[in-house]
Image (spheres, rainbow, N blue to C red):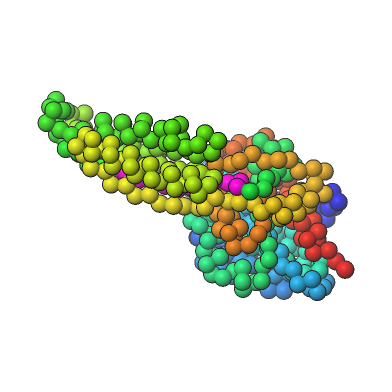
């Protein structure tokens, strides 16, 4: 079945919801306004249960079909939080809060799942239970992990769980997915190199931490080029280089390096952590300095299970006519935590020729709302066909 007529009719209303969320962005777990609106609408739609405060500010709605004889429970998840970016779209619905904006389309994700929830609550043309999940703090806060730690999967009896993200560069309204590892693990490191500071005109009296740090930055590039299997994906990026002195004539006592590691397997993740620590410590020691390394593991690899990926492809194909093969993505996604708890799949919905996500010129494409809503409904009805 293609895009459902009901969503074409609802498009102005769902667009208004989306633009209201866009104008009032909230960061991480501070999604109180958004969560409040979501909960209010789910109650108005007639959801059988609406529970707030899951994972701090997450919201869960339960919609039972005309029959629940199948016993199947399917979870559908959207994220609600924005990013600490100053918006530059110039749109009439632009952020009203300086330094905060929906630069990743979570406003659209929330609006589309709300639209699908309204339709499912009206029709209930399925045999089982749909659990709609509205998650805070995807952008670095681990809100998905928090909701799982709150016992969400067991509390609502979820058997399988699905997520969706808009994707600039994919034609508007088209879908793409892949089974197995899809989005990367996202780790962070901080390295402090302690040397011997002093006068820049007397480098022989110093242990120059800046030179040591520069050597280390270059050495760390060999993790991907010389330590890792060339057929495995790994990114090691130093993103910050800060010295303890800003004077022109002072050799700094300390330098702090910060950066990120992206991997798609546990083996590469362990390799990167071990090599960063070894290179930092031994490079510093070779120059007579000391290195202290803090390596923080972030989101795990997001892995789509094969069977559920097939289900997602079938639903997307029913809506758009086909579903393309998605590339590997070295960005992170905390839906990974939910996929560690239950089988499921994460799909991309084309946002068309827009600015990329996390860009101040980005905006969600409202024209794709009917496709996204139709996908959620098609997936629920295919997974739990009415008797």
Q: Residue furthest top?
A: 201
Image quarter where the C terminus lies is bottom right
Please indicate whether residue 294 sits to the left or right of residue 269 in the image. left
The image shows residue 112 at horizontal and vertical percentages of: 70, 54
Q: Residue at x 49, y 47 (%)?
A: 267
Q: Quadrant of residue 124?
A: bottom right
Q: Residue at x 33, y 39 (%)?
A: 279
Q: Residue at x 55, y 65 (%)?
A: 147
In the displayed structure, 242 sits above or below 204; it is below
Q: Is residue 309 magenta?
A: no
From where the camera sits, is residue 64 visible?
no
Q: Residue at x 46, y 52 (%)?
A: 298
Q: Residue furthest right?
A: 387
The image shows residue 154 at horizontal and vertical percentages of: 61, 71
Q: Quadrant of residue 244?
A: top left
Please indicate whether residue 286 sits to the left or right of residue 224 in the image. left
Predominant secondary structure, magenta span: strand
In the displayed structure, 237 sits above or below 41; it is above
Q: How many marks?
A: 0
- Quick one: 334 or 365, which is closer to the camera? 334
In the displayed structure, 257 sits above or below 13; it is above
Q: Which residues are magenta?
A: 181-192
């Amino acid at each position: 079945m293609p895009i459902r007529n009901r969503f074409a009719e609802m498009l102005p209303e769902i667009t208004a919801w989306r633009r209201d969320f866009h104008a009032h962005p909230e960061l991480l777990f501070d999604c109180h306004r958004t969560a409040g609106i979501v909960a209010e609408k789910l109650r108005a739609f007639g959801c059988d249960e609406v529970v707030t405060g899951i994972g701090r500010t997450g919201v869960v709605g339960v919609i039972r079909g005309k029959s629940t004889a199948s016993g199947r429970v399917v979870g559908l998840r959207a994220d609600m939080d924005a990013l600490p970016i100053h918006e530059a779209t110039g749109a009439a619905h632009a952020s009203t809060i300086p330094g905060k904006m929906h630069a990743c389309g979570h406003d659209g994700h929330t609006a589309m799942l709300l639209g699908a929830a309204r339709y499912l609550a009206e029709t209930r043309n399925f045999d089982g239970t749909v659990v709609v999940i509205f998650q805070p703090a995807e952008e670095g806060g681990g809100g998905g992990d928090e909701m799982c730690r709150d016992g969400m999967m067991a509390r609502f009896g979820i058997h399988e769980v699905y997520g969706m993200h808009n994707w600039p560069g994919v034609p508007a309204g088209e879908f793409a997915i892949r089974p197995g590892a899809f989005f990367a693990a996202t780790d962070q490191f901080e390295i402090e190199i302690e040397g011997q500071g002093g006068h820049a005109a007397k480098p022989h009296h110093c242990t120059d931490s800046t030179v040591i740090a520069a050597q280390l930055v270059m050495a760390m590039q060999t993790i991907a080029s010389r330590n890792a299997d060339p057929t495995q994906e790994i990114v090691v990026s130093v993103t910050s280089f800060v010295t303890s002195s800003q004077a022109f004539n002072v050799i700094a006592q300390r330098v702090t390096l910060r950066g990120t590691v992206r991997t798609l397997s546990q083996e590469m993740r362990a390799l990167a952590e071990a090599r960063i620590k070894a290179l930092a410590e031994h490079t510093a020691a070779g120059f007579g300095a000391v290195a202290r390394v803090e390596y923080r593991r972030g989101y795990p690899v997001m892995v789509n299970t094969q069977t559920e990926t097939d289900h997602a492809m079938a639903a997307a194909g029913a809506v758009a006519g086909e579903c393309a093969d998605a590339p590997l993505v070295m960005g992170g996604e905390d839906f990974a935590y939910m996929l560690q708890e239950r089988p499921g799949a994460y799909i991309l919905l084309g946002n068309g020729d827009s600015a990329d996500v996390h860009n101040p010129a980005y905006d969600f494409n409202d024209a794709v709302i009917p496709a996204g809503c139709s996908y959620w409904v098609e997936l629920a009805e295919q997974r739990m066909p009415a008797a």
